[in-house]
Amino acid sequence: MPLVTSKELFQKAYEGKFAIGAFNVNNMEIIQGIVDAAKAEEAPLILQVSAGARKYANPTYLKKLVEAAVEDSGLPIVLHLDHGESFEICKQCVDDGFTSVMIDASHHPFEENIAITKKVVEYAHSKGVVVEAELGRLAGIEDDVNVSEKDAAFTDPEQAAEFVEKTGVDSLAIAIGTSHGAYKFKGEPNLDFERLQKIAKLLPGFPLVLHGASTVLPEFVELCNKYGGDIPGAQGVPEAMLRKAASLGVSKINIDTDLRLAMTAAIRKSFSEVPNNFDPRKYLGDGRTAIKEMVRHKIVNVLGCNKLL
Ligand SMILES: O=C(CO)COP(=O)(O)O
Ligand SMILES: O=C[C@H](O)COP(=O)(O)O
Ligand SMILES: [Zn+2]
Ligand SMILES: [Zn+2]
């Protein structure tokens, strides 16, 4: 099966009140771990590539690795550009065979975000590629943030509806309190579900996207720290909140940090337990297995997109 777009996957996810996992990929072991998990759980996949990943691995290598995953696994896989920051990088990826691109012009004023997104949508759609955009600011939100600051940063529901109508975009990343990385909340985790419900009500049937959706599972932070790491006070989005978001119209859930933590914990453990090993296949293999187990866990217990094939 060739690469697919997310159109039908999102429709199924929306109707079934579950979400499709979008996992960030940077090298062969990460791709293999994710794909092995999806195969075991019969789940469709979104493999997403950031600008940083393209810089690290080289765009050609990453593309070929994903092609190998598609050929070897036979799974429906979407190849998605994560946080494309300009029309040019989105165009490059469309021309390069990606089936989905994200234009993240959320740091521009509203009207400019609309204009840039619309330009990407027109080009991508003419080539059969779908587009995700972003509205609102995802930066870490402190607990003591006041209401007007929160209103300025979080996605405005009316604007979201206007944005989708004016751009023709296929999915929209919203800001409701999540943020990237391992330090998402200072105190109790808290997402603005009321806002999510308002957005979903104004955009019935339309797939929303949650970035910064890693849970930062304490056992993996503890494992990292036990084997020489130093990651104090890390905290993510509780799994119950992610399931709730999926039931309210979030059809794509982005996960990177949890993969990083799982792989790092496994490699640290391997170094510590087998100090005389210097064969990278041993510790990278352990890292790959850890990614596989993490993704299986996400698919079955958080996303609910297993047994779909
Ligand atoms: O949103 C993400 C990638 O776009 C990843 O979020 P996390 O840092 O929570 O894994
Ligand atoms: O959105 C952020 C993703 O986790 C990708 O991170 P990166 O830019 O370090 O590759
Ligand atoms: Zn953004
Ligand atoms: Zn993101």
Image (cartoon, grey):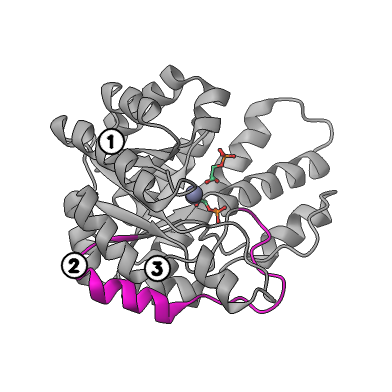
**The residue under label 1 is which amino acid type?**
Val
Q: Please identify, in this view, whether the residue under mark 3 or under mark 1 is nearer the observer.
A: 3
Is 233 on the left-hand or right-hand side of 220? right
195 in magenta: yes
Q: What's drawn in magenta, residue-wise?
A: 181-208
210 in magenta: no
Query: Residue at 31% of width from left, 69% of height from top?
Result: 158
Q: Please identify, in this view, whether the residue under mark 2 or under mark 3 is nearer the observer.
A: 3
Label 2 residue SS: loop
Residue underneath mark 3 = 156
Label 3 residue SS: loop
**The residue under label 2 is which amino acid type?**
Gly
Q: CA distance from mark 2 to mark 3?
A: 18 Å
**The residue under label 3 is which amino acid type?**
Asp
Mark 1 crowdedness (10 Å alpha carbons): few <14, some 14-19, many ≥20: many
Is 50 on the left-hand or right-hand side of 287? left
Quarter that holds the N terminus: top left
Q: Is residue 230 above or below residue 51?
A: below
Query: Residue at 35% of width from left, 32% of height from top?
Result: 69
Residue underneath mark 2 = 205
Residue underneath mark 1 = 120
Quarter that holds the C terminus: bottom left
Is 279 on the left-hand or right-hand side of 304? right
Quadrant in the rendering for residue 278 = top right
Front residue of 253 and 61: 253
Front residue of 229 and 102: 102
Quadrant in the rendering for residue 253 = bottom left
